[in-house]
Image: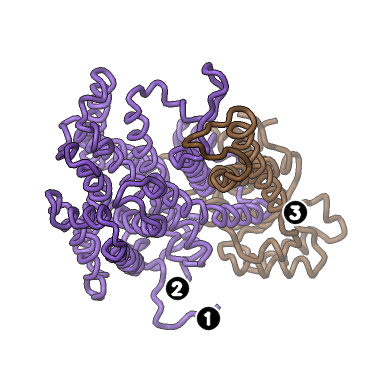
Chain colours: A brown, B purple
């Protein structure tokens, strides 16, 4: 599989792990107020207002989707008009076969509008989020897709504030675990021993284990 | 948002985030249960029946069916409309209920969408094989061909159907897959075997749940829901136009589009209830698919059943009032002709039976809902049979009046599509999360 490694590779993170979305949201707001630059948050489910709190803008994918839809609509019309009017008009029962039968092109135009919008938008979404089949994921905690929420701060971006202050802040905000030199790891590269351990104990690894995660292979 | 105190929680049993993950991943991470094997084996046997009867149809020809002049559309198109109709609930639940912010959809949308996709597979079999030469099944596509510039006819509702159903299938697949990605990632990160790690890793597309991705993801899901809503309404509208744009008495009716759409939602919810009541019982998902969910779905059944019933009566009144004797005869023939038994079965199953859901007891008693859901499925099959066969079997010329009965091949293909449907569904229940974990985790503290 191909490495994703564009966003998280070769970075050291200060992370706070939360088990409650409200606490995470509050922590993000507090850290922002104190001038800490937050790299990103990783949550198992969409946390409302989190993107707003992090200062992200609403995505422009909708504009792309609209353009794709227009293209689909035009394609539908072109297809029907070219085939049935320009190239080979099929005269059935002496009825006209020109632009006056436009209404019977509408279903095809409509369906192609939807088709192009859906596929265009989803493909753009995957491209924008750097997602493709077979890519390796970068995780900061194995449970970030299960029940833990990760608040990640890039150490290089926050030289002004001391790392200990950030850790204290995170703890004060209710983080159940903090770590100031976290590297991204990849579950598909988990070692054989860890697999064996996991299969004995199907429960996801606990706090103690996360610090012994195998560093990412280069 | 204010929520009244009488509202019930959406997820019962005091589940935590981790409980949701464990409960939903249980069937994927453990060996299948004996009941799964039993159901799966029966489904595969029926699938073999489908393969056999279809092979026989192709080998021997379409003459193995009893469709002929007068009744040129029989069980095949009945089954086609039946399956397409069932395929409407999934997108309805995930798209329209998302736009209406109905949170109870979240526990059931995944399986309903899966059902949609499998039902459309089943539906596609019928028109393809009805063409007779299935290897020429690409002919309805607008492709350059060897017959001069003879293109497909864009004035024909049958061609619109090709576009509508293929668009519906592909957009539903995309919608379903997009919803699955975060959950596939959850399975990937819990995986303890190499194969599971590889395959779920492959399909999770590197999802790591970053806030940036979630932001985009939610917008994409909302827009997909927005465009799927008119799409789902358009599909059965166009299917109804296959009939409504003809000149056959009984088909040539302007109320067909809304009537068919309501019927599709009705039958779709009937099938969703049938499947979910089994899944909920077998997989112990009573805490996720609560009696509140069942009640909400039975209310939809009651509403759409009543709309369908109203359409039956309207159709009849319009025929009586039209002063057009062929139309009047078509309806008199439905009610009192040789297929009256089918008509009254339909009336009982679709109009009368769902009225029991006015009672709270009926709406919240799983075994009773299960029986009614089966009745609804039967009724909606008969609706299509009545519309198609009774309108055709006595046409304008009494010398060409016939009676139509299906052959064993036609019956076999129909039963066989249940095999295909349930084989797909059992595989889905084994390999993919049946409940949308990411969405359910957002509502475990919420009320209905």
How far from the left and from the top, in percent, is residue A133? 58, 34
When asked about the image quadrant of residue B246, the answer is top left
- Dot label at residue A39: 3
Q: Is mark 2 on a helix, strand or loop?
A: loop
Residue identified by numbered label 2: B447
Residue identified by numbered label 1: B2
Crowding at dot 2, Cα within 10 Å, few <14 / some 14-19 / many 20+, comes out as some
Give left or right: position of B202 versus B313: right
Residue shown at 41% from the left, 52% from the top: B90
Residue shown at 73% from the left, 43% from the top: A7
Q: Is mark 3 on a helix, strand or loop?
A: loop
Between A152 and A161, the one nearer to me in the picture:
A152
How far from the left and from the top, in percent, is residue B280? 30, 56
Q: Distance between the residues labelled 3 and 1?
A: 34 Å
Q: Is mark 1 on a helix, strand or loop?
A: loop
Give the tally of numbered discs. 3
């Amino acid at each position: 599989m191909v490495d994703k490694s564009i966003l998280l590779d070769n970075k050291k993170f200060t992370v706070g792990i939360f088990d409650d979305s409200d606490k995470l949201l509050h922590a993000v707001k507090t850290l922002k107020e104190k001038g800490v630059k937050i790299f990103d948050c990783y949550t198992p489910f969409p946390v409302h207002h989190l993107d707003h709190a992090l200062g992200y803008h609403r995505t422009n994918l909708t504009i792309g989707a609209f353009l794709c839809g227009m293209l689909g609509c035009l394609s539908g019309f072109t297809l029907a008009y070219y085939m049935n009017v320009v190239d080979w008009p099929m005269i059935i029962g002496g009825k006209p076969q020109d632009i006056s039968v436009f209404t019977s092109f509408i279903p095809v135009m409509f369906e192609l509008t939807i088709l192009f919008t859906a596929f265009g938008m989803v493909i753009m979404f995957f491209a924008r989020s750097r997602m493709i089949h077979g890519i390796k994921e970068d995780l900061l905690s194995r449970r970030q897709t299960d029940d833990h929420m990760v608040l990640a701060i890039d150490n290089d971006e926050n030289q002004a504030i001391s790392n200990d202050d950030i850790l204290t802040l995170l703890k004060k905000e209710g983080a159940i675990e903090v770590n100031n030199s976290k590297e991204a790891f990849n579950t598909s590269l988990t070692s054989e021993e860890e697999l064996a351990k996991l299969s004995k104990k199907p429960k996801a690894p606990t706090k103690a284990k996360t610090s012994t995660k195998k560093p990412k292979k280069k | 948002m204010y929520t009244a105190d009488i509202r019930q929680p959406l997820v019962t049993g005091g589940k935590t985030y981790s409980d949701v993950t464990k409960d939903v991943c249980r069937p994927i991470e453990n060996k299948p249960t004996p009941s799964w094997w039993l159901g799966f084996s029966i489904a595969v046997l029926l699938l073999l029946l489908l393969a056999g009867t279809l092979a026989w149809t192709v080998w021997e020809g379409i003459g193995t069916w009893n469709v002929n002049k007068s009744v040129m559309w029989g069980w095949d198109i009945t089954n086609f409309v039946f399956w397409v109709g069932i395929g409407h609930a999934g997108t309805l639940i995930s798209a329209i209920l998302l736009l209406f912010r109905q949170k109870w959809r979240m526990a059931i949308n995944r399986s309903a969408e899966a059902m949609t996709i499998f039902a459309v597979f089943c539906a596609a079999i019928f028109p393809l094989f009805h063409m007779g030469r299935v290897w020429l099944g690409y002919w309805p596509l607008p492709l350059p061909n060897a017959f001069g510039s003879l293109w497909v006819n864009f004035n024909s509702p049958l061609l619109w159907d090709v576009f509508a159903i293929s668009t519906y299938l592909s957009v539903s697949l995309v919608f379903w897959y997009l919803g699955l990605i975060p959950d596939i990632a959850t399975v990937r990160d819990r995986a303890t075997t190499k194969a599971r790690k590889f395959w779920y890793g492959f399909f999770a597309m590197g999802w790591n749940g970053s806030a940036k991705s979630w932001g985009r993801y939610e917008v994409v899901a909302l827009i997909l829901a927005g465009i799927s809503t008119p799409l789902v309404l358009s599909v059965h509208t166009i299917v109804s136009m296959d009939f409504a744009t003809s000149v056959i008495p009984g088909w040539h009716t302007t109320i067909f589009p809304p009537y068919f759409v309501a019927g599709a939602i009705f039958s779709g919810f009937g099938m969703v209830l049938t499947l979910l009541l089994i899944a909920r019982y077998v997989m112990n998902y009573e805490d996720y698919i609560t009696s509140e969910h069942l009640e909400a779905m039975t209310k939809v059944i009651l509403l759409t059943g009543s709309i369908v019933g109203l359409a039956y009566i309207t159709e009849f009144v319009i025929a009586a009032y039209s002063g057009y004797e062929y139309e009047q005869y078509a309806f008199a023939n439905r009610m009192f002709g040789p297929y009256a038994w089918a008509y009254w079965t339909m009336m009982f199953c679709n109009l009368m039976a769902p009225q029991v859901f006015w009672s709270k007891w009926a709406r919240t008693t799983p075994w009773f809902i299960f029986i009614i859901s089966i009745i609804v499925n039967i009724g909606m099959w008969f609706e299509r049979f009545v519309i198609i066969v009774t309108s055709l079997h006595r046409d304008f010329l009494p010398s060409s009046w016939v009676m139509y009965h299906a052959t064993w091949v036609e019956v076999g293909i129909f039963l066989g599509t249940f095999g295909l449907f349930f084989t797909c569904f059992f595989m889905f229940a084994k390999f993919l999360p049946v409940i949308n974990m990411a969405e359910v985790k957002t509502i475990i503290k919420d009320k209905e």
